[in-house]
Structures are given as structure tokens and as C-alpha cells.
Image (spheres, rainbow, N blue to C red):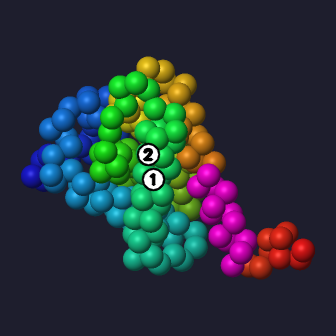
Amino acid sequence: MFGEFLNIIFKSIKLDRSLYSDSKNFSEASIYFAGLIMILDGIAGAVAANTVIKTAIAMSGLTAILTWFIWAILIYVLGVKIFPEKKTKVSFRKVLTFVGFAHAPGLLRFFAVTPELMIPIIFLTQFWIFAALIISTRQVLNFKSNLKSFGIVFLSFLIIVFLSISFVMSRMNALPVNSI
């Protein structure tokens, strides 16, 4: 079981397309593997950020779970419901699973042990995760082009950025609509 988990992590880090096309990687335990990857990814991000500012590790794990669901919902709605291909027949559970798998490169953030390494490692792993999301979206949703897969992932990313900025600004009472 642990060997299967490590195999999923290594295939995701290598950006191996077979991870997302092999049905055995979407077994009953796969959703738990994906969830564990997301929790560890959040903790790794907190460890990396702690080299500069103090962050709550438990809160980072919970935030990673929330982010996982948001990514999966957006990719599912955009890729399966709004812009599907003819062969796109995928359950939300499978989308949730591949989004979790695609975050495995984020585990490399555990290596950001000094402030000088933090920013380069976080940026590198974020682009790596983005690439894994594009590959997994294309494979699982049976898209014909990388461009369509990129569009779905990039649009999901923009929506997440907008929601994140809106949330933070609303907490600071800094939204321009507050003064209207």
C-alpha cells in the first residue's frame, strides 16, 4: 500500500502521463492517497514559509484541503460540464483524485529550509504543479489538445486568485465596493 502511494508521488513528480491513464491508480484507496498528498503539500508549504514568517502548520493542512476541493470543483465544472470533449465522461471523484495527485511536486517544498531557498522552491514547485494539472486534465478528461487543458487549468487558477484576493481584501475591509 505504501509502495503504491510512493509510486503515485514519483510518477506525478516525473510528470508521467501513465499515472492518469492507468485505471489501477484510481482504485478505492486513491482518494485517500490524493487527500494525504494535499495535506502533506499544505504542511510542506507551511514548513517552507516558516523559514521567513511563522505560519500555523495545522491551518496550512486544512487550507490545502479546501484548495483541493476548489481546484477540483472548478476543473470539473469548466472541463466536464461547460467545455467537454465528446469523450469526456468523468466523475467528480476522479477529478478530485487527479487534482490531488498533481500536487505531489509540492512535497519538494520540504527542502526549502533556508530563506534563500524558499522563494525559488515555492515558485518552481508551483509551476511544476501547474504542469502536472495540465497533463492530468488532458489525460483524464480526454482532451485532444494541451491548449484546451491549459485553458481549463489557467481559468481555474484565475478564479482561485480572484476569490483569494477578494477574501483577503474583505477581511481587511479594503474592497472598493465597501465605500459605495
Using the image as rendered, state which of residue 152 and residue 53 is in the foreground: 152
Classify the position of the C terminus by image quarter: bottom right
In the image, taking residue 28 as reference, residue 36 lies left or right, namely right
Q: Residues within 10 Å of mark 2 (few under 14, many from 20)?
A: many
Circle number at residue 76: 2
Whether residue 167 is visible to the viewer of this picture, yes or no, is: yes
Type of the residue with mark 2: Tyr
Helix, strand or loop for the magenta stretch, by majority: helix
Whether residue 117 is visible to the viewer of this picture, yes or no, is: no
Type of the residue with mark 1: Ile
Identify the image quadrant of residue 42.
bottom left
Question: Which portion, as a residue range, is magenta?
Answer: 159-171
Residue 142 placed where, x, y %?
37, 27
Q: Is residue 49 above or below residue 162?
A: below
Residue 82 placed where, x, y %?
52, 39
Q: Is residue 114 above or below residue 4?
A: below
Residue 20 placed where, x, y %?
29, 34
Q: Is residue 173 above or below residue 137?
A: below
Residue at 63% across / 48% down in the picture?
158
